[in-house]
Image (cartoon, rainbow, N blue to C red):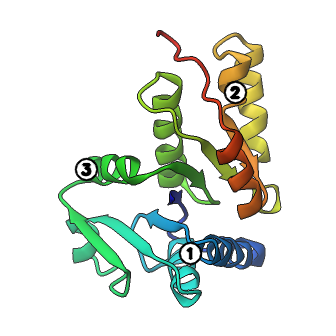
Amino acid sequence: MRVTVYAGSSAGHQPAFAQETAVFARELAGAGVEIVYGGGSVGLMGVLADSALAAGGKVTGVIPQSLVDAEVAHLALTELRVVDSMHERKDTMAQLADCFVALPGGLGTVEELFEVWAWLILGHHAKPVMLLNIDGYWDRLLDLVDGIARAGFMKPEECASLVPVANAAELFDVVASWQPPAPRWG
């Protein structure tokens, strides 16, 4: 199984973000799950990769040449795929995934999460999309999503297709019982 993970290029202010990212990475590696991520060596991305590798896990990074040139690529991964653009990066990461999970992160993490979640709702894939909700980081986003549904811009089952999890065991449970929502226009 391959899990595509979106994560911040900084570690954030709460120590729990890095601590729980490391635990999550070790849990995935211990279960023989390959991690696919954005290929960076910094922030939570670096914590994720380093922790999984230290636990004997397989980690594939997908990174655009511009970020390799900026010297933020993780050069000790199992595999590092260098692509031409951010669009190619996102597409490659999505194709490699059996499921997706977003860790705490900034605008790039949120953008990647929303794109792959929109693709699910539109029927472009049927893979689970999850949030590792460390220290309640995603609570406000989940409240926003509920408000979008209450306002009539999403169906309840579409909202429910963005699944918060607390750890790798919950991720595995979601994957095992996953039923994608019906495509919006199918």
Residue 73: tell me if it is visible.
Answer: no
Determine which quarter of the picture holds residue 24: bottom right
Residue 149 picture location, percent across and down? 72, 18
The total number of labels drawn is: 3
Residue 5 picture location, percent across and down? 53, 59
What's the distance in space between the residues labelled 2 and 3, CA to CA? 27 Å
Quick one: SS at disc 2? helix
For label 1, the residue is: 48
Q: Residue at x 46, y 76 (%)?
A: 58
Q: Residues within 10 Å of mark 3 (few under 14, many from 20)?
A: some
Residue 82 picture location, percent across and down? 22, 67
What residue occupies the far left of the structure in this picture? Answer: 84
What's the distance in space between the residues labelled 3 and 1, CA to CA? 22 Å
Disc 2 to disc 1: CB gap under 8 Å: no
Residue type beneath disc 2: Cys
Query: Seen in the image, is 155 located left or right of residue 146?
Result: left
Q: Residue at x 32, y 46 (%)?
A: 91
Residue in front for this viewpoint, 102 or 183: 183
Residue in front for this viewpoint, 66 or 100: 100
Disc 3 to disc 1: CB gap under 8 Å: no
Query: Seen in the image, is 38 located left or right of residue 87?
Result: right
Q: Which mark is residue 88?
A: 3
Q: Which mark is residue 159?
A: 2
